[in-house]
Image (cartoon, helix red, strand yellow):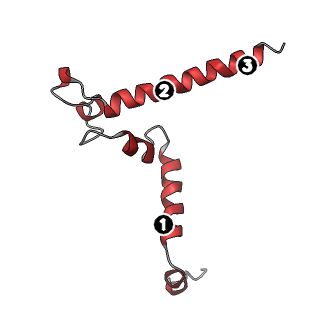
Amino acid sequence: MNFINPLSRLIYQGFEILGLWRDLYNWTRIHYSLWDQTPAMAMGLAEEIWSVLHYVHYPVHVGKFQRLEWNEQRDSILESAVEVYNREKCLPI
């Protein structure tokens, strides 16, 4: 019984590592058979070769709604209190 839980955790971590390797392989590694491009550039998903730091800052594996939520959170943090106060208020109909 004690052997099953660590084994399943190891398998799950293995899938995460394979996913990370696949993403880094497709976004940061130049493939000379693609005329010095990454596979992401060849598919039109990127315009430049990404560094690992760029990949970490911009996760490509999240959904559209998660990215929109993060953008709203970032914008609310960057917005000053004066801008919030001066923003036009919507009146209920």
The numbered mark, 1 or 2, whose residue comes first in the sequence reads: 2
Q: CA distance from mark 3 to mark 1?
A: 41 Å
Q: CA distance from mark 1 to mark 2?
A: 30 Å
Mark 3 residue type: Pro
User: Is 55 left or right of 81, judged from the image as shown?
Assistant: left
Mark 2 residue type: Gly
User: Is 78 left or right of 10, judged from the image as shown?
Assistant: left
User: Which residue is depicted at the point 17% across and 29% down?
Assistant: 36
Mark 1 residue type: Asp
User: Which residue is depicted at the point 50% across and 87% down?
Assistant: 86
Q: Pointers 1 and 2 in contact (CB under 8 A)?
A: no
Q: Nearer the viewer, residue 28 or 88?
A: 28
Q: CA distance from mark 2 to mark 3?
A: 20 Å
Please rate how many residues cluster around mark 2, counting C-alpha atoms within 10 Å: few if below 14, some from 14 to 19, many from 20. Answer: few
**Image quadrant occupied by the C terminus:** bottom right
Residue 26: x and y in percent read 34, 29
Residue occupied by mark 2: 19
Residue occupied by mark 1: 75
Tell me the number on the disc at residue 6: 3
User: Is 28 left or right of 77, judged from the image as shown?
Assistant: left
Q: Nearer the viewer, mark 1 or mark 2?
A: 2
User: Which residue is depicted at the point 26% across and 30% down?
Assistant: 38
Residue 20: x and y in percent read 47, 29
Quadrant assignment, res 85: bottom right
Q: Nearer the viewer, mark 2 or mark 3?
A: 3
Residue at the limit of the structure toward the left, as seen here: 35
User: Which residue is depicted at the point 25% across and 35% down?
Assistant: 41
The numbered mark, 3 or 1, whose residue comes first in the sequence reads: 3
- Vertical order, 40 against 31 (above or below): below
